[in-house]
Amino acid sequence: MAVYTDVSDEELAAFIDCYGIGPVTSFKGIAEGVENTNYLLKTATGTYILTLYEKRVDAADLPFFLGLMEHLAERGITCPLPLKSRSGEPIGRLAGRPAAIITFLDGVWHRHPTARHTEQVGAALARFHLAGADFAIPRANALGPSGWRPLYERSRLRADDVALGLAQEIDRELEFFATTWPKDLPAGVIHADLFPDNVFFLNDTLSGLIDFYFACNDMLAYDLGICLNSWCFRENGSYDVDKGRAMLTAYDGVRRLSEAEWQALPILCRGSALRFLLTRLYDWLNVPKGALVRPKDPLEYRVKLAFHRAVRSVADYGVDAKALRR
Amino acid sequence: MAVYTDVSDEELAAFIDCYGIGPVTSFKGIAEGVENTNYLLKTATGTYILTLYEKRVDAADLPFFLGLMEHLAERGITCPLPLKSRSGEPIGRLAGRPAAIITFLDGVWHRHPTARHTEQVGAALARFHLAGADFAIPRANALGPSGWRPLYERSRLRADDVALGLAQEIDRELEFFATTWPKDLPAGVIHADLFPDNVFFLNDTLSGLIDFYFACNDMLAYDLGICLNSWCFRENGSYDVDKGRAMLTAYDGVRRLSEAEWQALPILCRGSALRFLLTRLYDWLNVPKGALVRPKDPLEYRVKLAFHRAVRSVADYGVDAKALRR
């Protein structure tokens, strides 16, 4: 939740004028997104989101993010579409920051998703992967295995303040992943952050995907692991086999997973759990005490990590991969 | 800016159902308002604001606030209108809190208002005062002179940390106001917080007033003093005589100020400046360091306070009250 940058009337009017979408009729800060400043913008021509990109987003990545949205929208994935200015540019400058206007997407995200939702998310993720296949701009995953250790070094000395034994556990995980990480699996553009708050539904039917600001190139099945972690566990930390089966089966129904991908899934899920444990641990240790933004609990991902460490095959996720092969 | 309370899908759907406004098509936290949780709510029937009243608002005051909006709207003041549930109630309960749905008001607030704006605000405030005259529910002003000293006691020991000499200055002001405060001036419902962010414009024409959660009964000219302070000073702290003259003249054009009100205006402005200095001082000293909500600068109001202390008559505000009498 955040509005980091205030925009003056004059600046706003001049900026909007570049897009030819008429005078502003409403302009309100939105309490969503921790990376950027987002405003809900209404004009005579419609409703939009105006985003100012704050320091945590590298301006050099914007052509990737905005280009990807346009690419996906052209291929039938419902996602916000960046507007182009009169000079044909999707990226402008406002209040000293890179800024863009994207279309507003109707829909609500579900705080308590069910298997009916995870099934649709699995299918949507597969369609996203297929649609992204011919996207030309590359972007490395800064939060892949090679980024984990440097990230962890910034939290390590205080990890045990969060939970006793956490430092040693993460040390061992990093050691494990230093030698064990799948290669040669199908790769492409991944969303990398398709959590429930980034998937909209209308009347329980998936209506769109948002927030592509972690998207990058990586193994497609790793993205599925991120989704499984963020959608298919109960609040008490236990894995929900119905939700997981629904997601994996639906994904496989749209984009067939290879034998190698099925086999790699437990380790990809485990790696994804570690990645979110590490970023949450860092945020947990570095958010000022008493700040209104409550950092997300890193330990939620410690529990998920332990679950995947114990998984022996995808059967533990509720699917019979061999049966899916038939 | 704040979303303090999260709302689950099931709770939201059940709540909306009480109002018969159809299924939710969008639901986003708004980063405005520091007292309550506000969501932008879209359904098949329109766009609304859903407000959850947090601890700082006394639930016993809600019939006053919501009743006032309805009362004003019926008298042609453009302001949000609370929806009534199927059972006729404007106040419901959601996520353990009192909650209401109000209509969404188009318009933008001006960060840098001009005299064209302050003129309209003066006239709108006068219309507000006239429209509120026959509103039946009373509500005392907890932030009137009798509330200033107890409020200050909670900041006093640290006031000089904010600015050297501030404690002594406030002590003297409180001493002054203990014996000097106008009585017997026309009173009624005042907005008490009509700052620029609570006044909407469309194409530079005032389109509505919002946020009635400080409204109460008090002297009408005191409300004008609050407005003058919040609209008619430059960023460098100096009084803008053009903006002030425009506001005062326009107010007087709609609701004629009595001789006694004109004479009392400097002291009412001075009291209003002290009131906002005190609440901002408290917030400044009690917001956790590093929190994303930046507290407003109390010293802005110290400068205004000093200005009004030096004022000898309304001529210093740019108006010849005698001329307005003719």
Image (spheres, coloured by chain):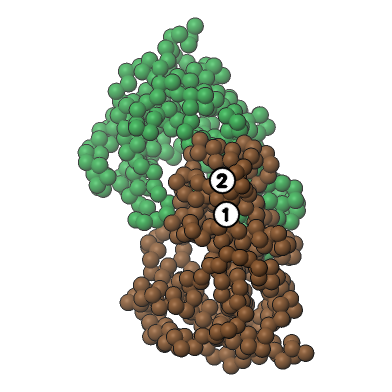
Chain colours: A green, B brown
In this figure, which residue is indicated by the disc labeled 2?
A: B28
- How many neighbours does mark 1 have within 10 angstroms: few (below 14), some (14-19), or many (20 or more)? many
Q: Answer above or below: position of B179 versus A46.
A: below
Q: Nearer the viewer's eye, disc 1 or disc 2?
A: 2
Q: Answer above or below: position of A310 versus B220.
A: above
Q: Amino acid at mark 2?
A: Lys
Q: Answer above or below: position of B22 versus A238.
A: below
Q: Determine the image quadrant of residue B159.
A: bottom left
Q: Secondary structure at mark 2?
A: strand
Picture coordinates of residue A110, whole percent (x, y): 51, 35
In this figure, which residue is indicated by the disc labeled 1?
A: A29
Picture coordinates of residue B276, whole percent (x, y): 49, 74
Q: Of the numbered discs in the image, which one, if any, rests on residue B46?
A: none
Q: Answer above or below: position of B299 versus A293.
A: below
Q: Secondary structure at mark 1?
A: strand
Q: Chain of mark 1?
A: A
Image quadrant holding the C terminus of chain B, namely: bottom right
- Look at 56% across and 75% down and name the residue there: B218
- Look at 51% across and 31% down and name the residue there: A190
Q: Amino acid at mark 1?
A: Gly
Q: Is residue A228 visible?
A: yes
The residues bearing labels 1 and 2 have C-alpha atoms spaced at a distance of 10 Å
Check the image and name the residue furthest to the top.
Answer: A326
Picture coordinates of residue B204, whole percent (x, y): 73, 65
